[in-house]
Amino acid sequence: MDWIIVDGHQDIAMALLEDEGWDFSAPAGSGHALSLADAKAGRVVLILGTIFATAGYWKDATPAECAERQMGLYEDLLARHADDMFRVESRGDLQLCQPGGPIGLAHLMEGADPIRSPRDLKRWARRGVRVVGPAWNTGNRYCGGWDDARGLTADGKRLVAEMRANRVIPDVSHLKPEAFDDVLACDDGLIVASHSNAHALQAHRRNLTNDQIQAVAERDGLVGVVLYNPFLGEDPVTVETVLDHVEHMVGLVGADHVGLGSDLDGGFGPTDAPEGIDSVGDLRRIGEGLAGRGLEDEAIGKILGGNWMRVLRRALPE
Ligand SMILES: [Zn+2]
């Protein structure tokens, strides 16, 4: 049980932006499930910290301004906790992500609104953004949202091409079916769904159908199980509910294509996360639960961290 944990989706900067009094380094509590102390204690070695800056999200800031501000918050965090966190910039850096060592941080942009043009992607990639979702629930210049008819636009297709050129992985988690298919049609490269569950178990539009889960697996990607109760099931939602989603996906595509994308503190508090998961330090309970259901240790290791490591190795330079 010497698993390492990689969490593919934590809205750290969003939580810092919205709660100025919050101390990320303190143990979790007072409405926050994210915490550096709990991550370290819970064998979390690598985190994809999101940049969430869709149009209209933050006061009168433009998406680019909001994204800059969030990136600044990450820079402050890295400077303040230089012994405990570092930015992952190369494949070699992944090897430094070990329990007891500093936690690696890379970034995921949730909605490409801050990227001014497809060519502008390169600038964000250089700053540590390794995964980009073309759109969040609302549409932008690259991709339609849930309330309009567009899929990927011409600029969206150019953006995906720029992602490939810069080793940035497309995230299909928030995409409606048309846009999901458009991303698949762009090329045959790796894709991830950083934080989505199985639609077969919980019929929410944010969850993926079996066909979509299989499409992600065929591209050698992964689906990160998300710990937001409305995406998991009806009350009471517990760790067992999470295990049901993991088991369903593993049954469908095998243990190589399932991971964690907790989405903790993403606009919801611990009360909207499953019973038994009060903080990021409790993610290992998913591993313990899977062991209890008879999953082999090697498979559990992949699900908790190994698969994100494999995927990110492909997204990072030597
Ligand atoms: Zn999200």
Image (cartoon, rainbow, N blue to C red):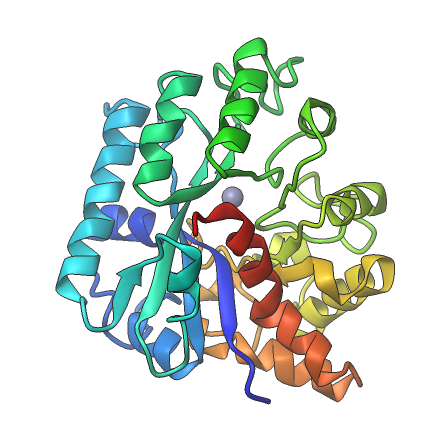
Horizontal side, residue 74 vs residue 292: left or right: left
Q: Pick out the residue farthest to the top.
A: 154
Q: Pick out the residue farthest to the front.
A: 318
> From where the camera sits, is residue 233 visible?
no
Percent position (x, y) of residue 201? 80, 56
Percent position (x, y) of residue 238? 64, 73
**Quadrant assignment, res 29:** bottom left
Horizontal side, residue 148 vs residue 199: left or right: left
Q: Residue at x 54, y 62 (%)?
A: 309
* Nearer to the camera, 142 or 25: 142
Instruction: Reply above or below: 232 against 102.
Output: above
Percent position (x, y) of residue 247? 79, 68
Instruction: Reply above or below: 62 against 126.
Output: above
Q: Residue at x 51, y 72 (%)?
A: 5
Image quadrant in which the N terminus is located: bottom right
**Quadrant assignment, res 224:** bottom right
Q: Which residue is drawn at 67% across and 13% down?
A: 149
Instruction: Reply above or below: 187 against 259.
Output: above
Horizontal side, residue 56 vs residue 262: left or right: left
**Quadrant assignment, res 117:** top left
Percent position (x, y) of residue 94? 43, 64
